[in-house]
Amino acid sequence: MSVEGIFVMTATCPPPDALVHMEVILHLSNSGSTAQMKSVMKVLRVDHDLAGNNRSGFSATGKGFLLSTLSERASREVAGLIKGSKEAAKLHK
C-alpha cells in the first residue's frame, strides 16, 4: 500500500480497468485508536497464480486515500507514518 496505490491479495479479482471502492482500517500501534482510509481506485493489472501457489492479486491506483481518524493522537500517528513512507520512497529513487 502506498499513498496513491495498493496491491491486494484476494481469491477473486476484479477485471482490469474496473473501479473499486477501497476501505482500509488501520489499527494504530501505540494509541489503541483506529484510522479509516477510503478511496475509489482503478484496477491496473490482475496477477494469477502468484509464486506458483494459486494465489491471485490486483494492483489499483487513484488520487489517494481520504483519511479519517477518531482522535487527534491517531491523526498525529498517521501523519508520522505517511511522512516516513514519503521519505523512504525518496531514498529508493
Image: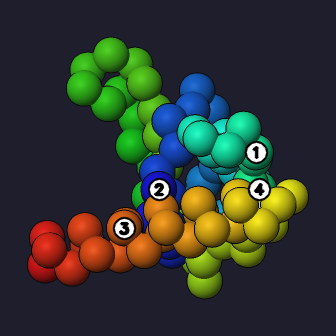
Please identify, in this view, whether the residue under mark 2 or under mark 4 is nearer the observer: 4
Residue receiving disc 4? 36
**Residue 3 visible in the current orientation:** yes
Q: Which is more N-terminal, label 1 or label 2?
A: 2
Compared with 58, 71 (above or below) is below
**Label 1 environment density (alpha carbons within 10 Å; few <14, some 14–19, many ≥20):** some
**Label 3 environment density (alpha carbons within 10 Å; few <14, some 14–19, many ≥20):** few
The answer to which of 10 and 89 lies nearer the viewer is 89
Residue receiving disc 3? 84
**Could you tell me which secondary element the residue under label 1 belongs to?**
loop
Marks 2 and 4 sit apart, C-alpha to C-alpha, by 14 Å
Residue receiving disc 2? 1
x and y percentages locating residue 92 in the rendered image: 14, 70
Please identify, in this view, whether the residue under mark 4 or under mark 3 is nearer the observer: 3
The reply to whether callout 2 and callout 1 are in contact (CB within 8 Å) is: no
Which quadrant is the C terminus positioned in?
bottom left
The reply to whether callout 3 and callout 1 are in contact (CB within 8 Å) is: no
Q: Which is more N-terminal, label 3 or label 2?
A: 2
